[in-house]
Image (cartoon, coloured by chain):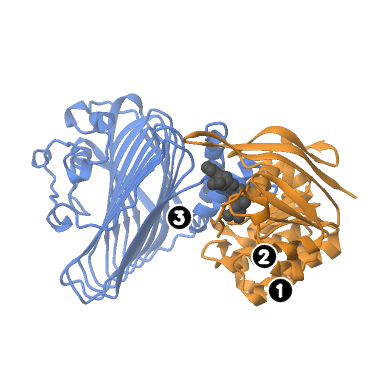
Chain colours: A orange, B blue
Amino acid sequence: MATLEIRDLHVMVETKEGDKPILRGVDLTINSGQTHAIMGPNGSGKSTLAAAIMGHPRYTVTAGTIRLDGADVLEMSVDERARAGLFLAMQYPVEVAGVSVANFLRTAKTAVAGQAPALRTWGKEVKTAMDNLRIDAAFAERSVNEGFSGGEKKRHEILQLELLKPKFAILDETDSGLDIDALRVVSEGVNRALENTDVGVLLITHYTRILRYINPDYVHVFVDGRIAEEGGPELAERLETEGYVRYLGVGATMN
Amino acid sequence: MTVYSERPAAIPAGSRAERLTSFRPADFPAPTRALEEWRFTPLSRFRPLLDEASFVEPCDSQVTLDLPPGADAAITTGPMAGQAGAPGDRAAVVAWNAAKDTTVLTIAQGQRLAEAATVGVRGGGLDRPCARHLLIRAEAGSSATVVLEYAGPALLSETVEIVVDDGADLTIVTVQDWEAGSVHAASHRAVVGAEARLKHICVTLGGDAVRITPDAEFRGEGGEVEFVGLYFADAGQHLEHRLFVDHNQPRCKSRVTYKGALQGQDAHAVWVGDVLIQAHAEGTDTYELNRNLVLTKGARADSVPNLEIETGEIEGAGHASATGRFDDEQLFYLMSRGVPEDEARRLVVRGFFGELIDQIEVPAVRARLIAAIDGELELTMGVSS
Ligand SMILES: Nc1ncnc2c1ncn2[C@@H]1O[C@H](COP(=O)(O)OP(=O)(O)OP(=O)(O)O)[C@@H](O)[C@H]1O
Ligand SMILES: [Mg+2]
């Protein structure tokens, strides 16, 4: 069993107007096989948390720790974090012109596994995973994310999750922008990963809809750079009806 | 800050049809940045190549020929009548007049070379400029690949005439890989006969300032020209490619595909692609594309396609130009999949050049090119943002 442990994490971002603190003391522990949902208003810092865990250079950790089975994640470069078992399905996946999906997947798999995958089984594995996610075989030869629709990008992220088999996966709004069928297909992919690999999942979402497919063990309410409340799946239901009003100052509005 | 430009095709100041060509230096005004053909060029770096008086013998530049059976070469002295049009700018006319002899490489009628012929040019040092003249002729019905390899330190001004007779099929691969400090100006002028085909692959890697101007025109119907280019500009390098395809015959086809990567402070690439479809050139089919990949801050790419169409009866005509950055987000994305930074860059740059490298059918040149690009990338590590 693996553990990802975040303690008192403070993160800031450099802006033209100066340093801007975004995360203000995040505490979160995830174990293998668990699913944690994070919900919270726009701009509360959810993507920042995801990016900081993965080591995005724009975000500076000013205090706190992130440990993966005791190892200091903050000391690792981005690629080292991935090889240590962290994975981030991005809210806005990036286009990489001229690099085919097939080449990208093979390169990534080789990098995280430390050796090239066996040619024969790998081809089959990719094809099955693509079929499961209803990704047309033609995508293998297309440039990574180039000209993909929003939903196709998200499915491509989950394809990587299934193939790279990380210890912990952070899914940043993977459900946003998906149609009803795609939401189900993507959720099935996450559930397959949970079943097959015992991955621990941190699921960032705005909607309880995805939580009908992927059952969270814990729900965290994220407000103003920290976790304001924690609970079980019932917390998500309550947020659905009440919104975030109770966590925000009087007169605050949301959209 | 990275500066990059993306311009729509524009009719150049003065049509390409009206641009002067001549064998007489006095016909050309002294280059200034105000002139269209010099507006992106750092003139001070090319100065020694722009004045015939600076070419004094002896010139130490050397040529070696490696010819397969069927290819024939000779060195002729004395002035040559221009086989492939006249010089189109000051650098070209100086090269024409300063060269004392001509290396003539001929592929005899109907010969089909199984192996590439290689012309190696070794620069004559950085002390004084040299001028060279190379004429490559593929006679009717022949087929050949000719590799031009440029290496060493050089101040070189050059004319490369390319004559593709009717029904011939010629591939030229020219690789400029000069040592630091080198300056090279070359005018490649090609004429393509009826039902003939020229594929011209231009690879520019090394040298402080390199300016290549490949021009092509047709001598009959059904000719085909493919200009492929690949360049990699490092800190302080100026790599300029100015192409001109003159569709002066009906039913000819041209394709221009140039791609460049840039990295480091003041790396500068210039691509200008002029295509003129003359009034009587019905059935013309042309497309040109230039893409630049800016790998670091401080590099600049200028990319200007110009398409002039004087007839409505064309098969197809188009152009595309784009400059993109290899940015932090791309790097982060690839690294978040476990790919180390240097490999991520390699992946992106190889992907970018891949389709062009695949077109180089000479395995030794292709392998060297891949190695050269990987070598360039090793430079970036530590320089990058
Ligand atoms: N590079 C940056 N420059 C300035 N502000 C930033 C930067 N990155 C993030 N922020 C700010 O930090 C706050 C948190 O942003 P973040 O993207 O983490 O929010 P989020 O909870 O993921 O929101 P959403 O639900 O809309 O995706 C926002 O106010 C955002 O504007
Ligand atoms: Mg977000």
Kindly state the secondary structure of the residue where label 2 is placed.
loop
- Are the two marked residues, 1 and 2, in contact with CB atoms closer than 8 angstroms? no
Residue A216 visible at all: no
Residue B100: name its quadrant.
Answer: top left
- Rendering coords of residue B167 (x, y %): 33, 69
Circle 2 residues within 10 Å: few <14, some 14–19, many ≥20: some
Between residue B345 and residue A13, name the one nearer to us: A13
Residue A99 visible at all: yes
Three-letter amino acid code of the residue under disc 1: Arg
3D distance between C-alphas at marks 1 and 3: 66 Å
Q: Of circles 1 and 3, which is in front?
A: 1
Please tell me which residue is depicted at 28% across the width and 40% down the height of the picture.
B158
Give the vertical position of A4 relative to A197 (above or below): above
Tell me the residue that label 1 is attached to.
A184
Task: Give the chain letter at badge 2.
Answer: A
Residue A69: name its quadrant.
Answer: top right
